Image (cartoon, rainbow, N blue to C red):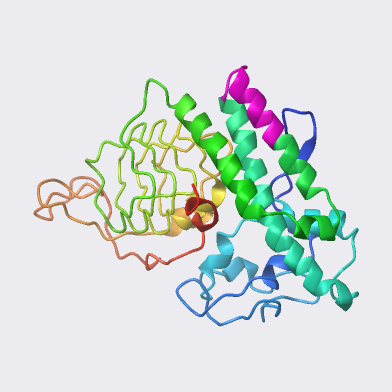
Amino acid sequence: MSEAVEQGATGGARELRADCARCFGICCVAPAFAASADFAVDKPAGQPCPNLGADSRCGIHRDLRQRGFPGCTVFDCFGAGQHVAQGTFAGRDWRADPATARRMFDTFAVMRPLHELLWYLTEALALTPPGPLRDELAAALAETGRLTDGTPEQVLAVDVDAHRDRVNRLLSRAGERARAGRAGVDRRGAVLIGVDLRRAGLAGANLRGASLIGADLRGVDLGAADLTGADLRGADLRGADLGDCLFLHQSQLDAARGDHRTVLPAGVRRPAHWSSLTVTPVRSPDGPAADGRSAGGRPSGGRSGRDRSGGGRSSGGRSAGRRR
């Protein structure tokens, strides 16, 4: 992703999108991953990915999905990588200074969730009018920023789970405040894997932490729905309206499927791979398929084809969802 800077309520500018050119490939080394639909190989924690070059760039970046690494395409460090590399460790590359490697990787494991919380708090502030709740959000943003600005030892001493729990209570209140007057069903943490939700009535729904892996959301109105941490891996968003949904970040979209009809909120981009997807229509037992074919298979103006994406699992949406 390109570099971007978000402005907090306290006036401090924070980079909350990855700038890989200013990192040292930390996310390609620090985490472990297992051979799966997300990753083509096993990789232990602390071992460089075999695709990582000496220049800290991915050697197959343009072909990650085709080469079996869709999990990499949906990972978002929220700017934690360059913060650790250029801020916490003052530009010291773990390759040139091997003694710092383990400490750098451990620091990144704490920094990334803190940066994710900075992103959510910034979004919540933009949604919340002046008042006590906004003041609490601003204070939480400042405190979270302070935690990210410490030395490696100070960052490693942060109790991330306790801090995240406190912040999440505020974020939940902010979501409820933003949905006031439009609140819909409460499906927090619901397991809706592969479920047909086209008639579920999800406008204004609370979907915080919901597992929507492979769910059918074609044409669904998700206006004012809170999607904090919702797992959208392989979810079908063709024709869905997400125009004013809450707390949707780019990696969630990157993990889903959609098309040119999917309405997106400001601040996110339409994933490039959506335009290359052709999807076999799923026929409803009592209505037309999403591509315009009738239940009897007669075309009514749409396209059909086989889904070459495989509905692949990806890591988008996991990190925030299970605790929200």
| Rendered view: 194 above or below 308 | above
Residue occupying the point 34% across, 64% down:
307
Tally of numbered tags: 0
Residue 118 sits in which quadrant? top right
Residue 55 visible in image: no
| Rendered view: 81 above or below 65 | above
Q: Nearer the viewer, residue 11 or 132?
A: 132
Q: Is residue 14 left or right of residue 319?
A: right
Q: Is residue 87 left or right of residue 16?
A: right
Magenta segment includes 1: no
Which x, y percent locates residue 284? 15, 51
Residue occupying the point 30% across, 41% down:
219
Q: Is residue 241 left or right of residue 141?
A: left
| Boundaries of the magenta span | 128-140
Which x, y percent locates residue 7? 73, 33
Q: Nearer the viewer, residue 322 or 92?
A: 322
Magenta segment includes 130: yes
